[in-house]
Amino acid sequence: MAALDPVKGREALQRYRVMAWVTGTMLLILCVELVLKHVVHVGPDVVRWISWVPFAHGWIYVVYLATVLDLWSKMRWGFGRLVAMALAGVVPVMSFVLERRVHADAAARLETAPAN
């Protein structure tokens, strides 16, 4: 098994952190869009203006999953961590909470990794 590469690990961690925040923000915007559409029953002009949100979140989530898989494979974490990180992109606020924990765990692991 190959050793953990600290440089590649830090790069993957940075990409993950950015996508966790972007995905979490888009998910919150999606929640607002759903409330406006189905609870508040805003007019058709507003619905037309916010109809792009689900599509944008869907594609951003795909990119987020790629960054999750990249970081997970570089850090050699267990399958449970992969599932938790993937779910964080579809559970409101979870991506922000999990990003902090993943960052702390990854940073600690990268600190102890031998340089190549």
Image (cartoon, helix red, strand yellow):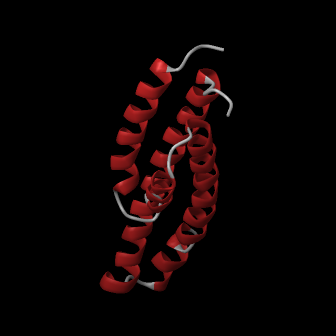
Q: On screen, 49 above or below 60?
A: below
> Is residue 52 found left or right of 2 in the rendered image?
left
Say which quadrant the N terminus sits in. top right
Please, is residue 43 above or below residue 73 in the view?
below
Q: Which residue is nearer to you in this view: 49 or 29?
A: 29
Q: Residue at x 43, y 54 (%)?
A: 24
Q: Where residue 41 sits: x, y (%)?
A: 36, 86
Q: In this view of the protein, can residue 41 be seen by the observer?
A: no
- Closer to the camera, 85 or 24? 85
Residue occupying the point 45% across, 56% down: 80
- Hey, which quadrant is residue 52 in on the image? bottom right
Q: In front here: 105 or 78? A: 78
Q: Position of residue 81 (x, y in %)?
A: 46, 51
Q: Residue at x 49, y 39 (%)?
A: 17
- Which quarter of the image is occupied by the C terminus? top right
From the top left corner, tell me how far across and down residue 30 is, in percent: 44, 67
**In the picture provided, is 27 more to the left or to the right than 13?**
left
Closest to the observer: 88 or 109? Answer: 109
Percent across and percent down for residue 110 are 50, 24
Numbered-mark total = 0
Note whether 5 is above or below 56 in the view shown: above
Q: Is residue 83 in view from this perspective?
A: yes
Locate residue 12 relative to residue 38 in the image: left or right: right
Point out the residue furthest to the top here.
115
Residue occupying image coordinates x 55% and y 37%: 75
